[in-house]
């Protein structure tokens, strides 16, 4: 490659020269230039965007009745249940005596069942509960019907929510009986 005098005085000249495209540092840059940059959590973004795209395509190409059910019916039902749970209290009503059950002879499909569920706002009274129970029948509340729970009797003017909290130990099972 060079003269003998040059090779003896310069030790680096004695090494074989490597072409630049085969040099290790240039190989590393060439390899990294072809590979896209990927971060540790890139797969999550890619997976979510793929699933969102697939969901959009499926929704767009689906039947119109399914679209409107998903868009309006399901959210509407969820909103209604949530609104009712946040604005009204649920009470289960039991009637102890068969003689004071509401007259449901006009109903062809159903009659009175113990444990029926009634929803009332916070300011409802015991009188409102009785009227609501007997509204399914002829609408007349028997005069001697009393309401209570856990052996305690409630007056017609009592606030329903406070009476249940105080007398029923937060167990909203109200029993109606004839005195």
Image: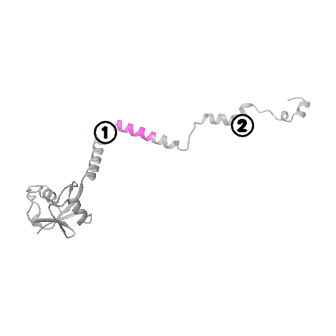
Q: Considering the whole magenta stretch, tell me its main secondary structure.
A: helix
Quarter of the figure with residue 108 = bottom left
Q: Which span of residues is magenta-colored?
A: 49-66
Please tell me which residue is depicted at 23% across the width and 63% down the height of the picture.
164
> Nearest the camera: 70 or 90?
90
For marks 1 and 2, give the CA distance: 58 Å
Residue 98 x %, y %: 11, 66
* Colour mode of the rendering: one colour
Do the numbered discs 1 and 2 sit on residues whose CB atoms are within 8 Å?
no
In the drawing, does residue 107 fall left or right of residue 62? left
Residue 137 x %, y %: 10, 57
Quickly name the residue at label 2: 24
- Up-down: is 31 above or below 87? above
Query: Does residue 127 show up?
Result: yes
> Nearest the camera: 101 or 21?
101
Quickly name the residue at label 1: 67
Please tell me which residue is depicted at 55% across the width and 44% down the height of the picture.
40
- Up-down: is 59 above or below 168? above
């Amino acid at each position: 490659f060079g003269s003998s005098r040059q090779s003896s005085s310069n030790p680096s000249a004695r090494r074989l020269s490597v072409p630049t495209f085969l040099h290790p540092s240039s190989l590393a840059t060439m390899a990294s230039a072809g590979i896209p940059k990927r971060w540790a959590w890139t797969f999550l973004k890619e997976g979510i965007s793929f699933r969102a795209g697939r969901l959009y395509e499926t929704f767009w190409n689906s039947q119109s009745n399914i679209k409107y059910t998903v868009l309006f019916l399901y959210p509407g039902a969820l909103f209604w249940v949530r609104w009712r749970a946040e604005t009204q209290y649920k009470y289960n009503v039991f009637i102890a005596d068969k003689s004071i059950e509401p007259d449901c002879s006009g109903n062809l499909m159903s009659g009175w069942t113990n444990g029926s569920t009634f929803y009332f706002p916070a300011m409802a009274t015991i009188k409102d509960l009785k009227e609501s129970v007997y509204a399914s029948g002829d609408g007349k509340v028997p005069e001697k019907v009393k309401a209570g729970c856990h052996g305690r009797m409630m007056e017609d003017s009592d606030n329903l929510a406070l009476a249940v909290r105080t007398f029923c130990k937060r167990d909203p099972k109200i029993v109606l009986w004839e005195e």
